[in-house]
Image (cartoon, grey):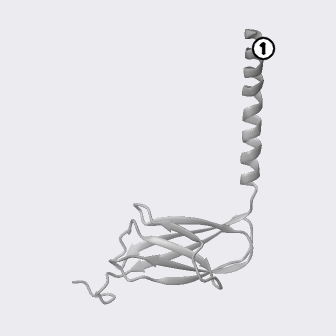
Amino acid sequence: MKTRNRFALLALLLVTPLAISEAGEKQKEKPYALLQGNVFTAEGFALPGIEVSVKREDDRKAKWRAVSNSRGEFAVRLPAGAATYEVSTHSKQFENQTKTVEVAGGTKESVVVVFRLARKGEERGVQR
């Protein structure tokens, strides 16, 4: 009886990694475009914690979201294919911006967008 259990366990251990690796390969094969960007203050310092939303130009609501990290960086995977996207920042302390980005349609294409946000109530180029 113990021999059967050991054999079943051994068979399970041998088959499981194959199933996991096949599932992982199928996920990796999906083509995508990478939208990456940076959020800075008007003075050029990294701005962490800024929410960024991405939507197709014709859509009403954002479909993808990210938050800038400690270096002000963010990245979003978008479906492969030619499309125009609107990328927007959302902050209570800084003026929000929206930029339009074109994705040509190549697989694993990379598009970069950079935001420089002024504090709310400040004029650009004038510090208080």
Where's the C terminus, which quadrant?
bottom left
Q: Which residue is located at x 74 percent, y 59 percent?
A: 30
Total tally of numbered discs in the picture: 1
User: As displayed, is residue 28 above or below residue 101?
Assistant: above
Q: Is residue 23 left or right of residue 45?
A: right
Q: Residue 96: horizontal and vertical position, in percent?
A: 42, 82
Q: Residue furthest left?
A: 128
Outermost front residue: 1
Q: Is residue 73 above or below residue 125?
A: above
Disc 1 crowd rating (10 Å Cα; few below 14, some 14-19, many 20+) is few
* Percent position of residue 34, x then y: 63, 66
Q: Secondary structure at mark 1?
A: helix
- Where is 41 relative to 122, above or below? above
Q: In the image, is residue 22 above or below residue 47?
A: above
* Residue in the image at 43% along x and 66% along y: 72
Q: Residue at x 32, y 77 (%)?
A: 93
Q: Position of residue 68 (x, y in %)?
A: 45, 66
Residue at mark 1: 4
Instruction: Answer left or right for 68 relative to 16.
Output: left
Q: Quadrant of residue 60?
A: bottom right
The quarter of the picture where residue 35 lies is bottom right
* Quadrant where the image shows the N terminus: top right
The percent position of residue 36, horizontal first and vertical second, equals: 56, 68
Which residue sits at x=43%, y=61%? 69
Question: Which amino acid type is shown beneath numbered disc 1?
Answer: Arg
Closer to the camera, 93 or 115?
93
